[in-house]
Image: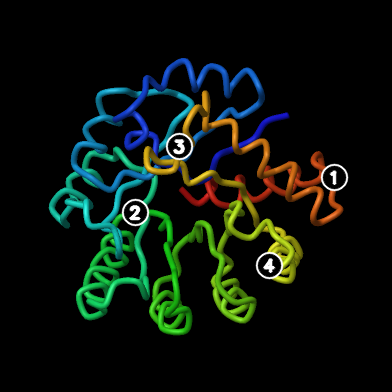
Amino acid sequence: MSIIDAHCHLANLADITALEPLLDEAEAKGITRFVSSALRKSEVAWHLQHPDSRIIFSAGIHPNFDECDLDMKDLKKLCDEKSIWAIGEIGLDNGNPEIAVQRKEFVQQLELAADYRLPVVLHIVGHQEEAYKTLKQYPLPYLVHGYAGSTEGFLQLKRLEAVFSISSRILKEEKLDLLTAMLNHKRILFETDITQYYVHEGESNPLLRLIDVVEKCSALSGISVPRLLGMQAVSARFLWAKN
């Protein structure tokens, strides 16, 4: 078994715990790659100071995270230095009323990704139609992380030939139609979205949640774990072959 955590925040998690033993335990249990997102200057610094063959990272200006202090100069420098695999997570979020600012930063970052031919990690909460209209102007590889909106919104976003990462947010009966649509799309990965803010009291290794995500997806969908991991492998090749 080889599983990829397609969206996590390892540098953020490193603020509260030593990661090396957690990574080692996760690797021993089949989680072999971590796709981390940096949203603060300190998180970028952590990734640059702690290179690990199991980790790749992206960076971006988040649409609804108050602690995000990255700016376009930071991102351009990372692109110039070829330090990041993608721009993100970026997008639109209806939890932030400053939609004009979101739109401006979203487009600026898409332009940057296009200039450097980098993939984009997307955070889309509401505003699916507007996001789609913007994104279709930029033919880039997209990873839509943790999408839990309407099935109609998913069907629109999938026209981008995007890869979607499945999170615990849709592993429930009321989201079964969305999960089924994603699995029929076949371009899927799995994620924990783990940060320091999501660690449960007494939880020894939150990275291992990924195994639960895959197993619960299998139980809900009726698709075997080996078949799900086969879909993951094909999706990973599709996404990272374009990188």
Instruction: Give, as a three-letter code, the residue at label 1.
Output: Ser
Residue sitting at the far front: 201
Q: Name the quadrant of the N terminus.
A: top right
Q: Give the residue number, with chain letter if any, for mark 2.
A: 87
Apparent side of residue 119 relative to residue 41 in the rendered image (left or right): right
Badge 1 vs badge 3, beta-carbon distance below 8 Å? no
Q: Give the residue number, with chain letter if any, for mark 3.
A: 199
Q: Position of residue 186 (x, y in %)?
A: 72, 59
Of callouts 4 and 2, the N-terminal one: 2
Marks 1 and 3: which is nearer the front? 3
Separation of residues labelled 3 and 4 (CA atoms): 24 Å
Separation of residues labelled 1 and 2 (CA atoms): 33 Å
Q: Position of residue 128 (x, y in %)?
A: 47, 78
Instruction: Give, as a three-letter code, the residue at label 2.
Output: Ile
Q: Classify mark 3: residues with Cα within 10 Å, few (<14), some (14-19) or many (20+).
A: some
Q: Classify mark 1: residues with Cα within 10 Å, few (<14), some (14-19) or many (20+).
A: some
